[in-house]
Image (cartoon, grey):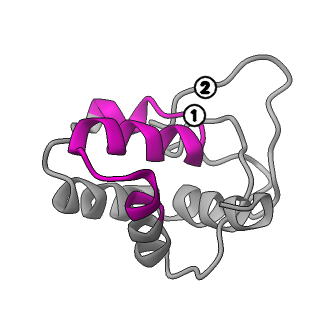
């Protein structure tokens, strides 16, 4: 995924995490809640899902884009998907280390 595309997907995931995480778990039954909430970026989330499910990164990326209703993906915020910051809709960059999604 391109950086701009990653940013859009990540923003949508963070804004709608509680609903989307259940859809992810439905589509990838081999993946646990702990697997996806520990991810710190879209790239990390894709890798975790691909590793557990046996699907390709590309297929997982496409499914995530479909789930969030985005044709392109967006950047990484380095915070758990389940955490919403004070500047909703704005990228939030961690100053030290990555945090899990959940």
Residue for point 82% across, 59% down: 90
Q: Is residue 13 magenta?
A: no
Q: Mark 1 or mark 2: which is in front?
A: 1
Q: For the N terminus, which image quadrant?
A: bottom right
Res 96 quadrant in image: top right
Residue for point 50% across, 82% down: 69
Q: Identify which residue, 12 or 5, lies in the foreground.
A: 5
Mark 2 burial class by Cα count in 10 Å: few <14, some 14-19, many 20+ = some
* Helix, strand or loop under label 1: loop
Which label's residue is closer to the chain start, 1 or 2? 1
Which dot marks residue 9?
none
* Helix, strand or loop under label 2: loop
Res 7 quadrant in image: bottom right
How many numbered marks have been drawn onto this rendered protein structure? 2
> Which region of the structure is painted magenta?
34-61
Work out whether 53 lies above or below 13.
Answer: above
Q: Is residue 40 magenta?
A: yes
Left or right, 54 with respect to 46, comes to left
Q: Identify which residue, 34 or 4, lies in the foreground.
A: 4
Which dot marks residue 99?
2
Work out whether 64 lies above or below 70.
Answer: above
Residue for point 36% across, 53% down: 56
Which dot marks residue 40?
1
Residue for point 44% across, 52% down: 57
Left or right, 35 with respect to 2, comes to left
Q: Residue furthest top?
A: 96
Residue 29: percent from the left, percent from the top? 13, 50
Res 89 quadrant in image: bottom right
Callouts 1 and 2 close, C-beta under 8 Å? yes
């Amino acid at each position: 995924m391109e950086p701009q595309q990653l940013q859009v997907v990540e923003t949508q995931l963070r804004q709608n995490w509680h609903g989307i995480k259940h859809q992810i778990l439905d589509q990838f039954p081999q993946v646990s809640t702990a697997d996806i909430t520990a991810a710190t970026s879209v790239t990390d989330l894709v890798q975790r899902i691909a590793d557990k499910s046996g699907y390709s990164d590309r297929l997982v990326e496409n499914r995530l884009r479909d789930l969030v209703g985005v044709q392109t993906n967006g950047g990484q915020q380095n915070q758990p998907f389940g955490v919403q910051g004070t500047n909703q809709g704005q990228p939030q960059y961690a100053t030290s280390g990555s945090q899990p999604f959940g």
